[in-house]
Amino acid sequence: MIRGLHIGGAFIVAIAIAGSTARADEGDQAMLRRVQDLLRAHQADIFGCVQKEPTPPEGELLVRVFVGEAGRAERPEVLKDQTHSKTLGRCLTARISGWDLSSLKAEVGDQIVFPLAFRPGAKPSQKQGPK
């Protein structure tokens, strides 16, 4: 199941593809919930990067991060960027580098990939009253 987070004027879909963290004894759904909780906790970081863009970003951006000692994020990098932004990926990796990933319950050295899909928010519909 894919779930999304609304952050400002952009719709961000958050899914986790965990490299070696996908152990047989741990359900994918549980990891998905932890990743969604982590992204929700850091939505101000993501929204801050989105706000800096001259136009609302649109497209998918894959960010990989390694779990370091004490659950700290290490070596975040953009694996794929379809947003056509020169600055969004740099901003996000800079913010992610300060995150505490211990809530994901991953091992040191594990890789987490955050696919972030940016879609401009829908404009409010103009409802008309009865004629």
Image: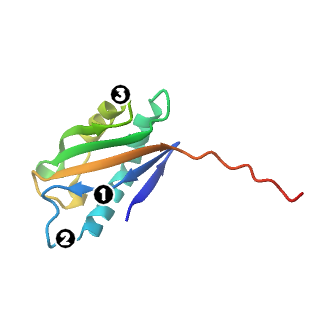
Residue closer to the observer: 100 or 52: 52
Please state which of residues 108 and 21 is positioned toward the viewer in this rendering. 21
Which element carries disc 3, helix, strand or loop?
loop
Residue at image point 53% right, 42% down: 9
Report how many numbered discs are placed on residues in the image: 3
**Residue 1's spot in the image, x, y percent?**
37, 65
Query: Residue 59: where, in percent of width, then height?
Result: 40, 40
Q: CA distance from mark 1 to mark 3?
A: 24 Å
Using the image, determine if residue 15 lies above or below residue 75.
below
Q: In the image, is 96 to the left or to the right of 12? A: left
Mark 1, secondary structure of its residue:
helix
Closest to the observer: 15 or 73?
15
Q: Residue furthest bottom?
A: 25
Q: Which mark is residue 60?
A: none
Q: Alpha-carbon distance for marks 1 and 2?
A: 14 Å
Give the residue at mark 2.
26
In the rendered image, which quarter is residue 81 located in?
top left
Residue at label 3? Answer: 87
Amino acid type of the residue that numbered disc 3 sits on in the rendered structure = Thr
Mark 1 = which residue? Answer: 35
Marks 1, 3: nearer the viewer: 3
Contact, mark 1 vs mark 3 (Cβ under 8 Å): no
Residue 67 lies, in percent from the top left, at: 15, 50
For label 2, the crowd category at 10 Å Cα-Cα, with few meaning under 14, some 14 to 19 and many 20 or more, is few
> Which label's residue is closer to the chain start, 2 or 3?
2
- Answer with the quarter of the image where residue 80 lies: top left
Q: Residue at x 19, y 70 (%)?
A: 26
Which residue is the extreme one toward the right? 131
The amino acid sitting under disc 2 is Glu
| Three-letter amino acid code at the position of disc 1 | Val
Q: Label 1: few (<14), some or many (≥20) within 10 Å?
A: many
